Image (cartoon, grey):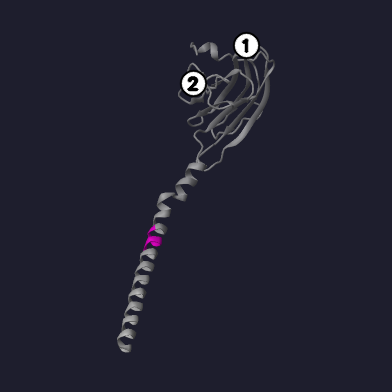
Amino acid sequence: MMDWELDSLGGENDAGTVFRDVIMLVLAGFVAVVLIMLPHLNPPGAKKSEDSEPPGNVVVEIHWPDNMSTDVDLWVQAPGDVPVGYSNKGGVIFNLLRDDLGNRADATNRNYEVSYSRGILPGEYTVNLHLFKNPSGVYPVPVTVVTSVKRDAKSSLRQILASKVKLTREGQELTVYRFTLDEKGQLKPGSVHSIQKPLRSLVVGKK
């Protein structure tokens, strides 16, 4: 009787050990599968490539106070191309990616517009501002303008020009600066000036 009881207990212990071993093997297999899948779920190389590649070569950005219900428009022109702004959002070189109407029809509070170029053409670039509407009635309207250049795929985006200007009336169009880039995408010394050059009037269109 005693021998049978000992054998029975020993059998139960063997069954428990086998069960625990099977569970551990299953868990180990699950962990191994997860570790194998992680690199494919979020490839670090792909993310690094996306983060390092800006969407354009010449980038022009403008920003004005977020609390102002004011519609300021960015107008740009690349060498030999048509002016690009709210009524003509794309040319051969530039594209306007954001037309900000101020606080109207805006899901964010940020007053911001940006244009990107596809490639860099040597020659003169023009950057203008146009005060389309100012329902806030607050003057002057301060606007910050920044231009950056990414010369090639191996270069990083680098700021070449920045300016702060004030718009004083509705309908005003102001040339912030005109500048020349050479064949290597570098700013030509002595080429920056702000001689007025209307852009909006060259393109007919309404908002």
- Which kind of residue does numbered mark 2 sit on? Asp
Local secondary structure at mark 1: loop
Q: Which residue is drawn at 34% across and 81% down?
A: 9
- Numbered-mark total: 2
Q: Looking at this view, is 188 or 98 the one in front?
A: 98
Q: Disc number at residue 196?
A: none
In the image, 173 versus 108, the foreground residue is 108
Query: Does residue 43 show up magenta in the picture?
Result: no
Quadrant containing the N terminus in the rendered view: bottom left
User: For residue 172, which quarter of the picture?
Assistant: top right
Which of disc 2 and disc 1 is earlier in sequence? Answer: 2
Residue in front for this viewpoint, 13 or 70: 13
Q: Which mark is residue 81?
A: 2
Please give the label number shown on residue 170: 1
In the rendered image of this protein, does residue 77 appear above or below residue 10?
A: above
Q: Which of marks 1 and 2 is in front?
A: 1
Q: Please give the name of the residue rendered at 48% of the width and 45% of the height, measured from the top-left corner.
A: 49
Q: In the shown orientation, is residue 89 left or right of residue 73?
A: left
In the image, the segment drawn in magenta is 29-33
Contact (Cβ within 8 Å) of mark 1 with mark 2: no
Dominant SS in magenta: helix
Rendered image quadrant of residue 170: top right
Secondary-structure class at tag 2: loop
The image position of residue 161, as x and y in percent, is 64, 30
Q: Out of 19 and 113, give the one closest to the viewer.
A: 19
Left or right of 120, for residue 137: right
Three-letter residue code for mark 1: Glu
Q: Residues within 10 Å of mark 2 (few under 14, many from 20)?
A: some
Look at the picture and state if 175 lies above or below 49.
Answer: above
